Image: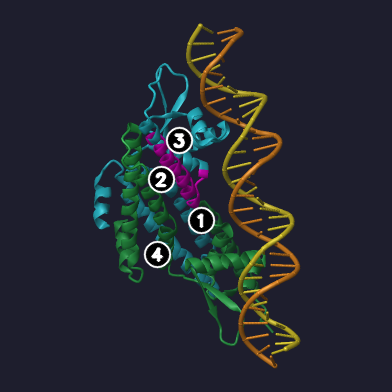
Chain colours: A cyan, B green, C yellow, D orange
Amino acid sequence: MEKQPTPQEAADAARLEAARDEFVMQWGAIGSAWGINRTMAQIHALLIIKPQALTTDEVMDELKISRGNAHTNLRELVGWGLVRSVVRKGERKEYFEAEKDVWKMFCIIVRERKRREIRPAINVLKDCIDRADGLKSGEARAFTEQTKALCEFMETADGVLSKIVRSEQSTIVPWALKFLK
Amino acid sequence: MEKQPTPQEAADAARLEAARDEFVMQWGAIGSAWGINRTMAQIHALLIIKPQALTTDEVMDELKISRGNAHTNLRELVGWGLVRSVVRKGERKEYFEAEKDVWKMFCIIVRERKRREIRPAINVLKDCIDRADGLKSGEARAFTEQTKALCEFMETADGVLSKIVRSEQSTIVPWALKFLK
DNA sequence: CCTTATTTTCAGTAACTACTGAAAATAAGA
DNA sequence: TCTTATTTTCAGTAGTTACTGAAAATAAGG
């Protein structure tokens, strides 16, 4: 049988629970401002602050969400590389744990957003530049000039981010950044 | 009376129109991936590639959207500082023009997202850290450690971005970044 | 003051995205 | 093989956000 918690322990547990809930809910809200599904951000937050891996059912229970919702968003997080699924020997069900190193998390997110959003944007810009190529009117020149500037800028940004993120393993870049601050 | 366009001119105008539409629509799609209202991104795209300022009615007409929609999103863009409203002497209606310098655009967006999203996130984290302060359980320590790491990271990022963006006027930073690439 | 051009607001609705819950599919153990 | 635990899918629905269109407010000109 479990040992009865002292009143002090019970109060502490409640306080931790409240702090965690605050974190999970707020992180969800922040996520949606950045174009990330609220539930996905909440699950991520939950897994980040849990020392051990959780099952789908535990996630469902903690966040009071349906199985389908939990499942889909866990898969999505695994797709991003922010969460790994682990199997414990002798157990049938899957457990999920988040990458906890903040710098690695950052690198993963940057790499994915580069791939999913910056690269496609650059391609769109190139396509637009091609379509207007050779046109001579003033309006056309303004269009070409602007799209070219935008494209060049995004390529530079893409390159800089690649450089920064390449060193995922190292601790030098985050350390250097701290001094840049 | 307007001069009749030659067949060549008409074809060129159509091609430019197509390229513009492509740009505006795709920019809208990209915007929504980044958590920005599609219409707002489209209006921004439109104003970026138009050499002259446009009226609300012209925006409505180009994008085939309602007055209310055009109005709200133009105001939002002005709120971000990405678009200015200008009045022409002797004319009653407002014209809108976008900031066209790509580096300035970038600085504005970074500054605003810092203010609207990074700063609030840091505050949430600090609040969560406070709430769990002094708790001694293993779970509590894991929570505190993680939220502190996250908080520190975001403060560093905030600081680095401030440094980069401070030099909005200068052309040195974008130039330097190009070589970092 | 009144008239008219222009901007602003907002109730109602449309469009979209996210979520539920249960059924179907899969895979492990007996 | 069959049974049971677990994961996956998905039709239907709820919830959210964005948009329209028209009415109200504002402001300029006469």
**Residue under mark 2: which chain is it in?**
A
Quarter occupied by residue B9: bottom right
The amino acid type, in three-letter code, at marker 4 is Cys
Q: Quadrant of the C terminus of chain B?
A: bottom left
Q: Nearer the viewer, mark 3 or mark 1?
A: 3
Quarter occupied by residue B63: bottom right
Q: Quadrant of the N terminus of chain B?
A: bottom right
Count every numbered label the image shows and give the total.
4
Q: Nearer the viewer, mark 1 or mark 4?
A: 4
Other residues around mark 2 within 10 Å, as few (<14) / some (14–19) / many (≥20): some
- Residue wearing tag 2: A109
**Residue under mark 3: which chain is it in?**
A
For residue A78, side relative to residue D30 (left or right): left
Give the spatial CA distance, label 1 vs label 4: 22 Å
Query: What residue sits 36% from the left and 49% below the top?
Result: B126
What's the magenta region?
A: A12-38
- Residue wearing tag 1: A124
